[in-house]
Each structure stands twice: as structure tokens, then as C-alpha cells.
Amino acid sequence: MSKRFLRPTFTHFVPFNDELGCIQVFCERLTMQHVDVLGKTIELSKSEMIHTVDSFKYAVPEVEKMVRSAGYDEFQYRAD
């Protein structure tokens, strides 16, 4: 039984979610594995997806609209 996550046994799955308007990042298990987390053993099944992040991208006008709708009057931004 493994006590830690084994990186080569995962692959990334990165679909665009039309409903949320964002990219979602998942790690997909390539094999079954048992992992100890905080003293508890968790079974990760083959093909199980672990959701790691949602990535939203906004244009400046969209951010300005959100800022103003939150009640702020001033808006400044920086870009690289």
C-alpha cells in the first residue's frame, strides 16, 4: 500500500466548462491506489477524477463591471 500520491500514475484532464465559463483542471488516476491522508486510508479508483482548480479569464470591461456592481467607484488595473 502506498502512503503518498505517485505522480506518474496521474494524467491531466482540462475541459472547458461552458456553463461556468471556465477551464477546469482535473487529475485522473491511471491506476488504483491507496493513500494515507491525515491518518485515514483513502482508495483512489482507476479513472477517478480529482478536481484541482477552476481557471476563469476576464477581459478588462468584464472586471470593471464586476467591480462596479460590487459597489466600488474606482477601478485601476495593471497588465504585464
Image: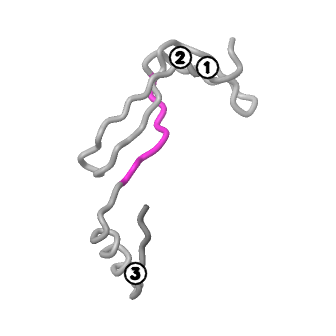
- Residue in front for this viewpoint, 53 or 44: 53
Label 1, label 3: how far apart the Cα atoms are: 44 Å
Q: Are marks 1 and 3 in contact (CB under 8 Å)?
A: no
Question: Tag 2: residue type?
Answer: Thr
- Residue 43 rendering spot, x and y as whole percentages: 58, 20
Say which of 78 and 74 sits in front.
78
The C terminus lies in quadrant: bottom left
- View extreme (right): residue: 39
Q: Earlier in the sequence, mark 3 or mark 2?
A: 2
Disc number placed over residue 55 in the picture, else none: none
Q: Are the residues tagged 1 and 2 within 8 Å (C-beta)?
A: yes
Q: Is residue 47 left or right of residue 6?
A: left
Identify the residue position indicated by label 1 in the image.
6
Label located before the other in sequence (1 or 3): 1
Q: Where's residue 64, x and y in %?
A: 33, 75
Label 1 neighbour load within 10 Å: few <14, some 14-19, many 20+ = few
Q: Quadrant of residue 79?
A: bottom left
| Residue labelled with disc 2 | 9
Q: Nearer the viewer, mark 3 or mark 2?
A: 3
Position above or below: 36 against 76:
above
Specify the label residue 75 is tagged with.
3
Q: Is residue 33 left or right of residue 77?
A: right
- Name the residue located 36 percent from the left edge and 34 percent from the top edge: 14
- Asked if residue 2 lies in the magenta stretch, the reply is no
The type of residue carrying mark 1 is: Leu
| Stretch of the chain drawn in magenta | 48-56
Q: Label 1's element?
A: loop
Position of the N terminus by quadrant: top right
Q: Quadrant of residue 57?
A: bottom left
Residue furthest bottom in the image: 73
